[in-house]
Image (tube, coloured by chain):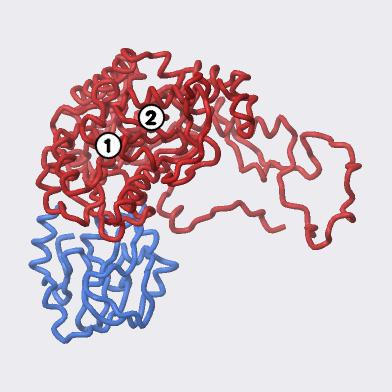
Amino acid sequence: MSEYPNNLRYSRTHEWFDPETNRMGISSFAVGHLGDVVEVDLSVDEGDVVDAGDEVGTIESVKTASPIYAPISGKIVAFNEDLADAPELVNDAPYTDGWILEIEPTGADDTSDLLDATLYSDHCASEE
Amino acid sequence: MTTQIHSGLLHREPPIFELSSPGRTGHALPPSEALDAEDLPQAFLRRQAPLLPELSEVEVVRHFVRLSQWNHCIEAGMYPLGSCTMKYNPKINDAMSALAGFTAVHPLQEDEHLQGSLELLFQLEGLLCRVSGFHSVTLQPSAGANGEFTGLALIKKAIDVRGEGARRRKVLIPDTAHGTNPASVVLNGFEPVPIVTGPEGVLLPDAVRPHLNDELAAIMVTNPNTLGIFESHLKEIAGLVHGAGGYVYMDGANFNAIMGKVRPADLGVDTMHFNLHKTFSTPHGGGGPGAGPVGCTAELAPYLPVPRVLRTNEGRYRLITEQPNTIGRVHPFFGNFAILVRAFTYMLENGGAGLSRVTEMAVLNANYVRSLLKDTLAVSVDVDTLHEVVFTDRDLKKETHVSTMDVAKRLLDFGFHPPTVYFPLIVPGAFMVEPTETESRVELENFVETVKAIVQEARTDPDKVTSAPHRTGVGRLDETTAARKRILRWTPAQP
């Protein structure tokens, strides 16, 4: 729970973004608090343009439902179709098979507002 | 035919379709002489008979009685569901609402033929005004959430009449609120703005101050809040909100904790809903229908739903629909009348002093449970509470990995309905106990001893707790799979 991949950047609302693949998902910290995910319901389509912080959908677990926010500004280019039948991928592999959206960033330096793994780890500790 | 295995008198029961035998019926009807299928328009005839279970009357009765025996109800045992207030419903309520004078009337009869029923509505409005301090009450809304919608619609109307509808759109909602609050706000075209509860578990004026501007429509406060704590700064906060041109909505879900002690209107509240099922002992859930009357100040009264019941100078009662600024109807006819009869009965049976005593007993019972249990389970905020007390599994989970959900499920094995769990959301692993005034000291102590035994068991035999319940008709459900692979409708096995 306390280890967050170093290659990713994190939002304070617990989304991760991978600058290599442009994929985003939710962090293991968020997954731990949500419990078993039962549905990922996206409110955006491929081609939509979003701003960092925009709500792009909700994630529902047996305990609660939570909004998902775009970690960066950009264009939605893909979403993880496997989640429709297997939302448990978010629990089982939040940083790999459980990715949610692929967002093509509009700005080159768009990840500067995001946290690196160390800062994010501190941020999570303060919320615990 | 399915072979059934019963455990003593607790019956295993398959879905009713699986009990079906072709051709079996409950009643033999003579052939219809009124109509032939040929006389009906062909387009409306169905090609196949509907797939209905075929059973005899006694099979149907047994099926549903058996299923009901898997369930728990307040008439079988303690039901300490916090925030829901599962108090006992006295039988005299039902007896009064079953009087022929009430059951044999029709809402479209002339006013003159409904005088008794209209008088009851008029008097109930008056009693609710007396306990709340409001100028007027509507009995129409059919539930708490419908009441919230109605109260906010009154506020919306008042703001529109002032010509500020386009600008004043923000409604402040504390993080302890019921989930229905933001929904009611959005349905009325407002925008919910969450505000944070202070460390003592109450709302502080400083949390409101940044929002005091000409965009503020209202604040929505539950008092006491869902931590069971009295919002001691509400009067000051109401003054601030009024000073900025906004209104104060009080969610009256927990009015049962202050009834006969505090009148919301005196705290500066402009409008509030009552949950008759929580405070005035009408049936709760499942058995519905419900009622969520709304009280308001003289300023908001012209906007109340129609029809209004008025008393003429001659002492007759009339239904008035001509109210130029009314928000309209929020329910057909006059609301759920038989429920209103029950609440009226409860108020008369108790009287003013009795209603105050109900409040005192509810508060005493909750604090008794808190004082007996607080060394066993951590409390969310260590202050005196009113009608309910919120524990947390924070320490228990750290020590044993047994969670609130496990303790709740294990309580079923000892004949108690679990308390409310995981609400309010600001408390991790919340375990929210509301005993109500219904329970005796002996019963409260039984509950406390049971919780203590389960917490001890969490240390010595945690598997027993995490796999509970063991003595119910149905064991622990796989809630995750049930939510991921939803089967919402029975379908026949392929032949």
Quadrant the N terminus of chain B occupies? top right
Q: Which mark is residue B431?
A: 1
Tell me residue B255's x, y (percent): 30, 29
Q: Chain of mark 1?
A: B
At numbered mark 2, what does the secondary structure look like: helix, strand or loop? helix
Distance from label 2 to label 1 (Cα)?
19 Å
In this picture, residue B425 sits left or right of residue B153: left
- Residue under pointer 2: B278
Tell me residue B59's x, y (percent): 70, 33
Against B334, residue A59 (above or below) is: below
Q: A11 or B122: which is nearer to us?
A: B122
Q: Which mark is residue B211?
A: none
Against B11, residue A111 (above or below) is: below
Q: Amino acid at mark 2?
A: Lys
Give the quarter of the image for residue B202: top left
Q: State the residue at coordinates (15%, 78%).
A: A111
Tell me residue B314's x, y (percent): 51, 19
Q: State the residue at coordinates (23%, 78%).
A: A73
Give the chain coloured red: B
Quadrant the C terminus of chain B occupies? bottom right
Give the chain coloured blue: A
